[in-house]
Image: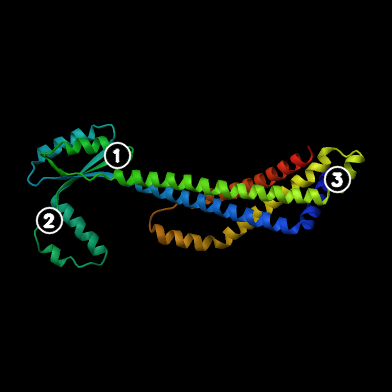
Amino acid sequence: MHFLRFSVRQALQGLWRNSVMTFAATFTMILMLILLSALVIVIAGVEAGLDYIETRVEVRAELHRGVLQERVDDLMTRVDALPEVAGVRYTSEEEALQQFLATREEQGQDTSVIAGVSNPLYAYLTVDLVNPRESDAVVEMLRGETGLVRFVPNQQLGIDRLVELTAQLRNLGVIVLSFVALTVLLIVVNSIRMALMSRAQEIEIMRLVGASDRYVRWPFILEGVFIGLAGALITLALLLVASPAISDVASDIAGSVPLGFDRSLTLQIVAISLGAGIGLGGLGAWISVRTYLR
């Protein structure tokens, strides 16, 4: 306990003596942790939205007019037998029109003109998938039924682009954060090194009277840890204050798509901020002290 109290007291004194570099290191640490938290929030929102969209992905095949119901039933049986298919539903031309009119009425649009003309819509099959990312086989099979099927849109291209965009966003974020983390590390190293140089005579006296390296080393390592801890706590406080605004902006962008902003994401951000802040601060201090004491 005596050693711990001594180390903490010396660390706090060192932070106060070297206040300018302490402020610079803490400020840069806050900047990095805010960028890290923003990246985690954005990726979590994109991935949650992507999962939601995938659950609503279905293959829709429009049918030619005048096709016999027996042929439609046979096609549904063959499609339903595919291992990628969870279920098949048939919608007639009349049902398709009623659904279209009901949707426009819910949106407050006038349907009287449309109701007075001939039905422009086609009957279609809706195929639910076991795995939304494995639609290619179903799409190819339906497109091969040229005598029954007139058009099959492939929604998988949009899903693949979203997945690719998410991966690129993650990679870009990692690159940016790597540069910022390196900057933070160098600032912490320089801050602790200046503290070491300002107390060089005191350290030399301690070593002459028999103080071990740990008595010299740990106060400075704790300085780095305190810088990281302060940066993490300030970052979390800023995020807490800004959380209503972040939630409103995210809701405006995403609309009805759920973004996965739940308790687990909050705990993840807290853990990442504290871990990254304390880890970088301690690592930078350890590197600086290790180099000095060689």
Residue type, mark 1 in image: Leu
Q: Are marks 2 and 1 in contact (CB under 8 Å)?
A: no
Which residue lies at the image location 75% right of the left edge and 58% below the top edge? 19
Residue type, mark 3 in image: Ile
Asked which secondary structure carries label 1, the reply is strand
Coordinates of residue 29 in the picture (x, y in percent): 63, 53
Which residue lies at the image location 38% right of the left edge and 57% below the top edge? 256
Q: Nearer the viewer, residue 238 or 118?
A: 238
Whether residue 8 can be seen here:
no
Of the 4 image quadrants, the one containing the C terminus is top right
Callout 1 environment at 10 Å: few (<14), some (14 to 19), or many (20+)?
many
Residue type, mark 2 in image: Pro
Q: CA distance from mark 1 to mark 3?
A: 69 Å
Of the 4 image quadrants, the one containing the N terminus is top right
Q: CA distance from mark 2 to mark 1?
A: 28 Å
Coordinates of residue 261 in the picture (x, y in percent): 49, 53
Asked which secondary structure carries label 2, the reply is loop
User: Residue beneath label 2, please?
Assistant: 120
Single out the mark in the foreground, 2 or 3. 3
Q: Give the mark nearer the N terminus: 2 vs 1.
A: 2
Which residue lies at the image location 28% right of the left edge and 44% below the top edge? 58
Residue 114 left/right relative to 18: left
Q: CA distance from mark 2 to mark 3?
A: 88 Å
Asked which secondary structure carries label 3, the reply is helix
Coordinates of residue 46 in the picture (x, y in percent): 43, 50
Q: Give the mark nearer the N terminus: 1 vs 3.
A: 1
Q: Nearer the viewer, residue 25 or 269?
A: 25
In the rendered view, tell whether residue 30 sits above or below residue 57: below
User: Residue beneath label 1, please?
Assistant: 129
- Tag on residue 203? 3
